[in-house]
Image (spheres, helix red, strand yellow):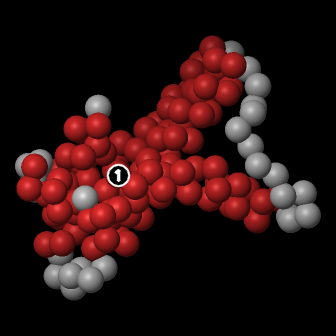
Amino acid sequence: MIGLYYKIWVDCITKGKQKPGNESKWPIISMICMSLSMAFNFLLFMTILERHILGNYFYKFDFPFLNSYINNVLSYLILFILPCVVVNYLLIFRNRRYKKLLKKYPYYNGKLFLAYFLMSMFLPILLMWGGIIYVYLRN
């Protein structure tokens, strides 16, 4: 499983480095894209776990002194984005580990990363629409 994670990262980094004008920006762009994808996957996993398996919501963080929109954004950043950024930093960027990974894993011309990114972004939406259609047809 970790090998696939590294392959996706190598694909993302190599594709990012090849884009003109990204010579100095590729680390932050890669980190944003991968962390956002992972956060969507984490959110989907936690939603399924809390709603359908455990039946209660335990993974939440509230700022009662803020309005609901800002509270939700801050909560999402702290609970989903921040853990992904920390994991990605520790496994990829700390001590420039990506240099070793770039030598070890093949480049898939950006296709592996693109598939992962698109699946991460659209799977929750497709599942939501599938659930809506299922409930509508059932009634």
| Nearer-the-camera pick, 78 or 108 | 78
Q: Answer with the quarter of the image where residue 19 lies.
A: bottom left
User: Is residue 103 toward the left or the right of residue 113 in the image?
Assistant: left
How far from the left and from the top, in percent, is residue 110?
Answer: 17, 56
Residue occupied by mark 1:
91
Q: Is residue 118 in view from this perspective?
A: yes
Q: In this view, does 1 lie above or below 122?
A: above
Q: Residue at x 64, y 56 (%)?
A: 78
Q: Residue at x 59, y 34 (%)?
A: 46
User: Is residue 95 toward the left or the right of residue 76 in the image?
Assistant: left
* Residue closest to the far right: 65
Residue type pointed to by label 1: Leu
How far from the left and from the top, in percent, is residue 16?
Answer: 22, 69
Please count the marks in the image. 1
Say what secondary structure mark 1 lies in.
helix
Q: Answer with the quarter of the image where residue 33 lies.
A: bottom left
Q: Residue at x 40, y 55 (%)?
A: 90
Q: Quadrant of the C terminus?
A: top right
User: Is residue 119 toward the left or the right of residue 86 in the image?
Assistant: left
Q: In which quarter of the image is the N terminus?
A: top left
Q: Residue at x 76, y 25 (%)?
A: 56
Q: In this view, does 87 lie above or below 55?
A: below
How far from the left and from the top, in percent, is residue 24?
Answer: 26, 83
Q: Is residue 11 in view from this perspective?
A: no
How far from the left and from the top, in percent, is residue 120?
Answer: 40, 44
* Residue closest to the far top: 138
User: Is residue 11 toward the left or the right of residue 130 in the image?
Assistant: left
Label 1 packing within 10 angstroms: few (<14), some (14-19), many (20+) = some
